[in-house]
Amino acid sequence: MSHPDLLDLSRRSGPLYAPTPFWAEGARRLAEDIDANGIENFRNKGAPLNFFVPTYGYPGNSLSDTQITALRAGIHPASAKQSAIVENWLTGHDQARVDYRVFAAAAQQCAPYLMAFSESDAGNPREHFNFQGRQYSRSALNYLIALTFLAQFADLEQCHTFLEIGGGFGTLGEILAKTREPETYRFIDVDIPPTCEVADYYLGEACRETERMTSAAASLADNHPIDDLPPLTVLPNWQIEALSGRIDVFVNFFSFQEMEPEVVASYLEHVDRLEPKWILLRNMREGKQVRTADDPIGVTTPIKGPFYAEQLPNYALRATDADIFGSTTADGFHSDLSVFERV
């Protein structure tokens, strides 16, 4: 099934599952760029880099190609050390190394098995960083750090079923598939088209030996008992209603803030119905930018931190962090990691 088919089904599933204002334009740009560049290059160029493929270097560092070229030219003549310092800053290597050190220090204490992970190069990534012989992207390090943050409170090896809404290209599923035995985990990614189809492609390439269900196959079924699902499952977003059973961990990174409050509230009702013991969220404390006539990529009503506690009466906030496991941007915005526990 191609992305126009799933997009049409998403729109026809009602206002809670149709692309919200942020993603109405975003989905169009993603589909066009993936068609133009090939899904095999989705991590290398175009709209995916601005929506669900985070980078440390361009464009994630907010510097244009012109500025980067000028900065490189402006340091010459320079010693080898001076050139390396500037290059490591421009490419994001230094920031990636900081994130890797946070992950490694925490993982060695509370989840050492995560240290075995090395990321696939499926999707032709624009950047990969090698630390101690293993490959990492910004997406991989974001999830690995978050898992070690959760491990401060939960025994990860007793967390078997993970549900994520807005799972990007499937990084969390890849981490689980490469660090756990098949019978010890289940990953369910609920997402809108065409992103769910990108996750289908990526998980198929990165985890070829792992049994999985694609979003196209899932869209043909009316009921998805969680205990009957394979280790890796990608569901088109409206099929969250078809899930039945219980999960251990619910995850959302950033995408809730790209939605409107009523849509997030509906998703969280389904999450609560599935009774996860733990909820792991990562979102900007200050909320997403508001859309304007000049820039349609934004939200109508920003969602900020307190909203989640209000929508989760059966959960207690255990911790929020933007200093060590989360991050703070150069212009003062806070990317909070938060852990909620069911009470």
Image (tube, grey):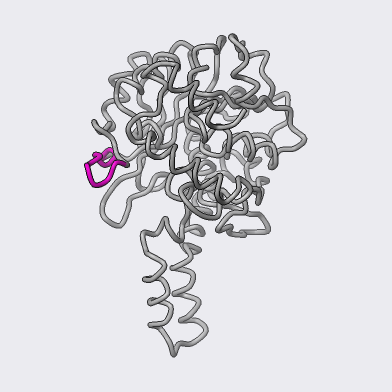
Q: Position of residue 227 (x, y in %)?
A: 65, 13
Question: Which quadrant: the N terminus?
Answer: top right
Residue at horizontal 42%, vertical 55%?
A: 60
Identified at 51% across, 51% down, the residue is: 138
**Quadrant of the image occupied by residue 125:** bottom right
Residue 290 part of the magenta segment:
yes
Measured from the top left, where is residue 230 in percent x and y?
69, 22
Front residue (pair 270, 30): 30
Q: In x, y percent, where is residue 99?
A: 48, 53
Q: Residue most toward the bottom?
A: 77
Between residue 149 and residue 201, name the one nearer to us.
Answer: 201
Lateral position of residue 343 relative to residue 113, left or right: left
Question: What secondary structure is the magenta-colored segment mainly?
Answer: loop
Residue sitting at x 60%, y 45%: 39
Q: Which residues are magenta?
A: 286-296
Picture layout, residue 151 above or below residue 76: above
Residue at the image position 43 percent from the left and 87 percent from the top:
76
Apparent side of residue 283 relative to residue 169 in the rendered image (left or right): left
Quarter of the image that includes the C terminus: top left
Q: Position of residue 236 (x, y in %)?
A: 53, 24
Residue 287 in which image quadrant:
top left
Q: Is residue 139 above or below residue 153?
A: below
Q: Is residue 81 covered in magenta? A: no
Q: Quadrant of residue 265?
A: top left
